[in-house]
Amino acid sequence: MQQRFLKPATLAAISGLELVAKTVVDGFVAGLHRSPDFGFSQEFAEYSIYNPGDDLRHVDWNVYARTERMFLKRYRGETNSPLTILLDASNSMQFGSHAVNKMDYSRFLAASLFYLAIHGQRDAAGLITFDDEIRNYIRPSTRQGQLHRLLAGLEQAEARARTDFAKPMRYFREFLKRRGIVIVVSDFWEPPESVVRTIEPLRYHGNEVVLFHVLDPEDVRPTLNGPSILVDLETKDEMEVTPDFAKTEYRGKIEAHLQDLQDRAQGAGMGYCRLITDRPLDDALREYLTLRGGRN
Amino acid sequence: MGFFSPWFLAGLAGAALPVYLHLLKRQTRLPKQVSSLMLFESRTQASTRHRRLRYFLLLSLRLAVLLLLILAFANPFVNRAAANLSSSRITVLAVDNSFSMRAGTRLADAKDAAMRTLSGLGGSRAQVAAFGSGMQLLTQPIQNQAALRVAVQSIEPGDGHGNFGELARAMRAMSEAVRTPIELHFFTDAQRSSLAPNFSDMAMPANVKLTVHQVVKKAEPNWTVESVDAPGQVWGKDLKPVRVQAVIAGYGAPAAMRSVSLVVNGKSVGSKSVAVPANGKATVEFPNLVAPYGFNRCEVRIDAADGFAADDVRRFAVNRSDPQKALLVHNYGDRRSPVYVTAALSAAAQSAFSLESIDVNEAADRQPSNYAFVILSDLNNPTALLINSLTQYVRAGGSVLIAAGSSAGARTDIPLFGARILDARDYTRSPNRFASVGSSDSSYGAVAKAEGWAGVKFFYALNVDPGDARIIVRLGDQTPLLLEKRLGEGRILLFTSGLDNLTNDFPLQPAFVPFIEQTARYLAGSERQGGGRPVGAYLDLRSAREQGQTVEVTDPEGKHPLSLKEASTAQSFQLSEAGYYQVRLANGRQNLVGVNADPKESNLDVIPDDVVSLWMGDRGQGGPATAPASGAPAPKQPQSIWWYVMLALFLAALAESALASRYLGTQREE
């Protein structure tokens, strides 16, 4: 089978996030079958009855002239779905056991989604980077040069401090008043119930919320050659751990943690996508387009 | 049990290393970063476990490897009764076949004694060797009595000079190789002249028991031709007579009249009687050796009046040939240097060279390879064609003497020689008006025979940068006066003054004639022709340039000792027999060399018994080698157990590798 998606390690060798995003998205789109759900053109879909409050710009005045009744003209691909990515830039995101750490992987992922949204879907796109505070906010927009602003924001995002969803969450709600797609990219090293409880309010404005859970292979299956002192990247706490624990008990606990987070997220009506940093980005793109298609 | 090299035991301190690695090194763990400790739980191993010897078996094996390695270096031995070692003991029968063993029935007596010793060995392992100038093993250590007897019988008299220090060195090498007790029976005439300069050089290793079987107990009188002084090369058509001087020596002999003959090509051409004093020497001279053209086999003989006839003759070779041509190239108008050089050559060199003098304008049509050597005198501006042909001539083995003279002062360098001219020294302006020779290399024949050029006044000389040239003579102000440089296969001499009497008064001094004579012989290479050499000397067969050209050597028995491969590659050849060697060198020249045994072999004085006893008893631990008294405890001999230690070390290393890979191998993912 021909491989359309480049490995993350290969993407790491490409300089420039725009080129990375273009490489990923072009490879992805070229492999798609034509589908009514994924039309990119301004294609006429239907007429709908005008209701007071609807945007008068969409009224078909020719029909009104002929029939004296007001109809709204609807097009495919004209849905109003701004994409906002909440990127976790805490210290734990800089962990990596191979060429691409989680922060790099998340940058590639966000860049590819921005490229797909702006060039493919003609949606507005915005970015919020945060750790225990909001570090950067780029408002969703379709203006000229928005992609470059977003990519610059990704380039500037440096992993630091520790994750705390609760603190910046109240600001998220202020920023995300317009309904759209909200993607949270993080390694979610917090108890699942706390994560879901904190993020769930984002849905209240009609947002589609998806959790992209970025994990390093070593996060899932740590290998220790002997009793080791482990250092937490965020808290700098140390702990002595034996290889036996890492091979047996830890694996059980991480599986349970991941499953718990997935169940709770889906139970709260949020999407959940687990991404391992040594795998290609196609899962994430497919998840986004599925969401996008469902909103048409 | 003991150790041959106990100081290696200091390495035992290194045994602490594995303990450190196991006990301490394992305690240290490098911190490893993780994204979060949220799901990890502390699992500290009990501290007592850290202090225990982990992987005790592995540690034991590692310690064993280390200890065995140190033991192997310390070379342990155990003292075992000599009787127990008889199975591994080697008996070496060495028969002296040096030149002195040709006297009387010495070699036959030695071989008889060796056969008797061989009969008493029973079935134990033995090895037969001949010892002349070196040890020559004739068999491997075998039990086959018949083969050993054949080997003893096959020993032929040699012409080498024995050195008992060489015997001890050979036994030391053998004992290192076999590491078993060696019983050495040495059958010899125990010549005093064969003793090593230092008695310690003759000491046998600890595991070698030496027994000397002397076939001669007292000295015998002997007369010999100790040396012959005669030229190896003579020139000329007039068959000018050649003077031969011989020294007749008597060793342990009373005063006697000896008849001395000069034999040329098998024909006696002269005979004289000489009175040889008791234990002394006498000189006899033959003033008229008439040697015909070509190589002549000459020898001086004395009448055989002793039991050692082989040393009553001394061989030498004389080659008579036509004078060789030499070329002198001088400046146009220079009449002085040809006159002086020609006069000096004709006066001294027995008409060996016919000098052709030409000016530089005539040099273009001369082929340098037709001349034995070329002299360039005071050339101001030699043509490039001449320099080029001379360079090729020298590279091919020719020789050139350059006399810089006064004309070269206008140049920046010496052509052909390549030396940079720093400045010209005009000594007529100095307070003394001249310069004298300051230092000279007395090992250089052309200078030594000219008595260091004392009294010669130099008025002008060039100061050149010698570079890699050898400086033979310097003036008083350190200006190089005579230099030699090798170019390819040839050589170039540079005389920084002139051969006329303008730049110096050298041509007018007596030293000029021997200088020109010796320089001509040196440049023509004639000092290497003919003559006599001692047995064991090496003969140069080729220079590096002549690789691939075959040489031909014919030994005194008419055989060709070099194989085809050796004939095309060998650089030198060792003259191993007395007699005449006929050689065709790689450059096509023929040579005949008379080879004679070392005169020291003619002194048949024997080593005193007490010295022989001391030699046999010197085994490092003192005490003479005497047979154990009946009833006394059997003597013990150290036997090295080095090999057993190495075997154990190998096994321990194997076990360690297997265990280490099991314990410390990479943990695999399930």
Image: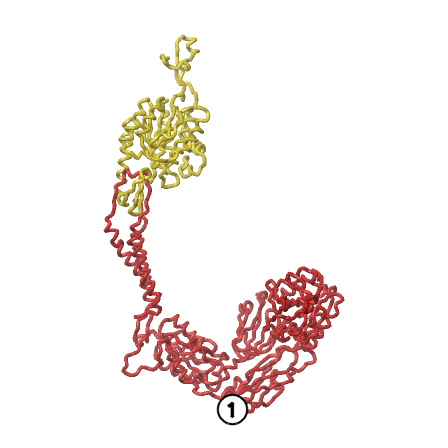
Q: Is residue A234 visible?
A: yes
Instruction: Identify which residue, A102 or B261, lies in the foreground.
Output: A102
Of B445 and B168, nearer the camera is: B445
Q: Position of residue B282 (x, y in %)?
A: 57, 87
Instruction: Tell me the amino acid under the disc marked 1.
Output: Pro
**Relative side of A102 to B445, left or right:** left
Q: Chain of mark 1?
A: B
The answer to whether residue B59 is left or right of residue B119 is: left
In the displayed structure image, the side of residue B424 where residue B636 appears, left or right: left
Disc 1: CA contacts within 10 A as few (<14), some (14-19) or many (>=20):
some
Q: Position of residue B495 (x, y in %)?
A: 66, 67
Q: How many numbered markers are drawn?
A: 1
Looking at the image, the residue that sits furthest to the right is: B333
Q: Position of residue A23 (x, y in %)?
A: 44, 33
In the rendered picture, chain B carries what hue? Answer: red
- Along the viewing direction, whichever of B421 and B49 lies nearer the viewer: B421
Q: Is residue A19 shown above or below B152?
A: above
Residue B327 in sight in this render: no
> In percent of the image, x 71 and y 70: which residue is there?
B500
Q: Is residue A165 above or below residue B377?
A: above
**Which residue lies under the disc numbered 1?**
B254
Quarter-of-image position of residue A117: top left
Report the quarter where the N terminus of chain B lies: bottom left
**Could you tell me residue B547's position as x and y percent?**
57, 65
Secondary structure under tag 1 reads loop
Residue found at x 34% / y 63%: B11
Colour for chain A in the figure: yellow
